[in-house]
Amino acid sequence: MQVVQTVFQADEVSRVFEPARGTIEKLTDRLTGKRPAIVQAVDRVSLSLAQGETLGIVGESGCGKSTLARMITGILPVSGGTRRFRGEDYESFLARRRDALKVQMVFQDPMSSLNGRLKVGEIIGEGAVVHGIVPRSRMREHAAKMLERVGLAADSIDRYPHQFSGGQRQRIGIARALAVEPELLVCDEAVAALDVSVQAQIINLLMDIRQESGLSMIFISHDLGLIRHLCDRVAVMYLGRVVELAKTSELFGNPVHPYTQMLLAGMPRISTERRTFMPIKGEIPSPLNPPSGCHFHPRCDRATDHCRISRPDLREKGPSHLHACLNA
Amino acid sequence: MSEQFFEVEGLNTWFFTRAGTFKSVRDVSFNLKRGEVLGIVGESGSGKSVTGMSIMGQVEKPGKIVSGSIRLDGKELTELSFDQMRKYRGRRIAMVFQNPLMTLNPLMRVRQQMFEAISEHENVPAAQMRERSIAALKAVGIPSPEERLEAYPHELSGGMRQRVVIATALLMNPDLIIADEPTTALDVTIQAQIIHQMRSQITDRGLGMIWITHDLATLSELADRILVMYAGAMMETGATAEIIAMPRHPYTSKLLESVPSNNEPGQRLKQIRGTMPSLLDLGEGCAFRSRCERASPACEISPPMRSFSSTHHAWCHHPIEG
Ligand SMILES: Nc1ncnc2c1ncn2[C@@H]1O[C@H](COP(=O)(O)OP(=O)(O)OP(=O)(O)O)[C@@H](O)[C@H]1O
Ligand SMILES: Nc1ncnc2c1ncn2[C@@H]1O[C@H](COP(=O)(O)OP(=O)(O)O)[C@@H](O)[C@H]1O
Ligand code: SF4
Ligand code: SF4
Ligand SMILES: [Mg+2]
Ligand SMILES: [Mg+2]
């Protein structure tokens, strides 16, 4: 039997945020004894990623995907839970700067993630030089090669990020990540800003790189069509929690969680008919004040009293198909 | 009153840089009826955003509207002074930008930004501004709007920031909304919610909307008409069903083929060969010719407009015949 190597593992990781408060607000809070609202952005999420595997993460805006991505990449500390890279405790792994480069992220917003004062060639090449992947004398050459790999002209190295369109900037972000030869690439809405034809090139590029180098990927997107196309397994998140996790064909063919079913039903499709867009049924929950029990109960057709009280844990539906619904 | 309340005719917006002149928008014309959604779709750098900024009178410095006419209810906008244009902006025409960070000030709370948007055009008491802001946030599906009013942009997720921007655009009940990639960062349920919200505004109040996107699937379900742009120029335009069911321009046809749902899962996606040429060395002729499988020597001269119905037109020497 083939041994599957686990690249990354998260065990019940959580993250809370406290909203920024002014001095006066802090004072009134103290006087009134009110506790400031906290946001539980990620609530005890566990997942693992095998060598060469691509795991997709989908979910509503604000459900914690980017926060989870930033914890996986190590940019953001966890409030609870543990992370491991190839079995090693993540903090000690990250402490070795050269190794930490093995995990790279491509961000949702290409403009704010690129340093506007640096030339594109420096943005892409600097990390590789600092960490001894290429000598400084070959930095320009290395950056030019990466640019060509993502479909940009090699002579872009002497231009600045603001001189590119949104789609072109996103390719620069991908080139920067690839330049340090990562083993795990976390893509947070990496192609959301790109039009379909460029998106197709980037997706094909990621699939080629994955095949050539055995790169493992976490691919966050709200585009279910893309997730279905690219990912081996998919995790569906709702208000900070994973509610369903399954092989891609299983998840799309046989979704069991009511939220997943609702997402799939809402998937936009190329059509010649105008669709009637419906308002969201039930109240839209707030991460500042999440519903009790199953977070999804105010919007769920199948909710029972039990759902309003108990937090559903992930349970098995079949082999490698997990869901967190009490009535599925 | 003419049916078309908004018209763009022969718009050319160019950027005069040291490297040369980037002709970002070339001879673009379209119009809009009240209650109608026009979708503009095209590759990065095809000039969609510059078209939007030209309408807003917000083309940045080395750039300039070189020629063309932009009319709202017959009023020529390109001749307005900066101050006159500011009165139109926000009040009669609102734009939702691709990147919410461009519109939101990171140092100001949501409340301050929304109040400022109102007080720029109207003098109303704070309580009323508050009420209107909360209603607008609710309409775009922001939970706990009272608390979120006090948040700073960095405390909101990407999708929430974008919804704040949309809510702010809706505050002044504009006649025309230009939405530049407004829902690309949103999941399908929230996207449907916002589209529902915008749709009802459009129908109830007779607004017009220009929806700029690369998401053909959403566009096919939302837009009444579609304009396909490439390298600053119009390629094809028509009613949505015409464009989706029977694309006539080779570029449109290739775009549709590259959508993931039109491909086998796990296989390489069909992609358009090559990349978009630099706007500097386009020269004469069809802008798509370096990537087109149907190109012939004839394509070295600018393609003529070919009509397939009263609404369906393509600019191509060798359009796909049905
Ligand atoms: N300030 C500027 N200076 C020079 N060139 C510019 C400037 N702004 C835009 N351009 C150029 O104009 C062209 C069109 O840009 P625009 O941003 O409109 O494209 P777009 O279709 O919106 O692309 P995307 O979807 O990637 O944002 C691009 O080639 C871009 O480089
Ligand atoms: N720095 C922060 N301070 C306070 N709240 C935050 C911060 N970052 C994220 N949040 C909150 O965490 C939740 C999840 O955000 P995020 O991970 O960005 O969502 P997604 O990427 O799925 O859209 C949201 O409620 C958001 O407002
Ligand atoms: S646990 Fe209950 S409320 Fe939650 S999804 Fe299942 S049926 Fe619906
Ligand atoms: S004009 Fe020629 S090059 Fe341009 S799209 Fe038509 S066939 Fe292709
Ligand atoms: Mg996000
Ligand atoms: Mg744009």
Image (spheres, grey):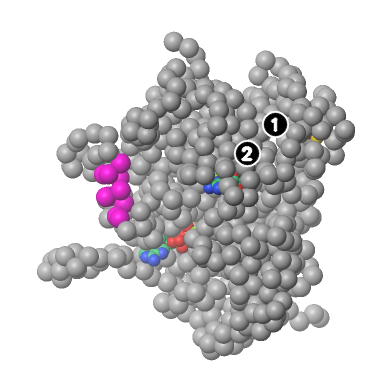
- Indicate yes or no: mark 1 CB to ligand 4 under 8 Å: yes
> Residue A258: x, y in percent?
53, 52
Residue sitting at x 23%, y 68%: A35
Residue at mark 2: chain: B
The verdict on a common chain for dots 2 and 1 is yes
What numbered label is drawn on residue A182? none
Q: Nearer the viewer, mark 2 or mark 1?
A: 2
Residue at mark 1: chain: B
Q: Answer above or below: position of A54 versus A264.
A: below
Magenta span: predominant SS is helix
What is the three-letter code of the residue carrying label 1? Met
> Residue B6: x, y in percent?
48, 22
- Residue closest to the eye, B90 or B71: B71
- Mark 1 lies on a secondary structure that is strand
Residue sitting at x 24%, y 34%: B122
Separation of disc 2 and disc 1 at Cα? Answer: 16 Å
What is the three-letter code of the residue carrying label 2? Lys
Q: Answer above or below: position of A24 versus B185.
A: below
Image quadrant in which the C terminus of chain B is located = top right
- Residue closest to the eye, B36 or A266: B36
Q: Answer above or below: position of B271 versus B76.
A: below
What numbered label is drawn on residue B23? 2
Q: Earlier in the sequence, mark 2 or mark 1?
A: 2
Instruction: Provide the residue span drawn in magenta.
Output: B108-117
Whether residue A171 sits left or right of residue B75 in the image: it is: right
Q: Residue furthest right?
A: B297
Q: Is residue B271 visible?
A: no
> Residue A265: x, y in percent?
58, 44
Q: Residue furthest top?
A: B1
> Residue A73: x, y in percent?
55, 74
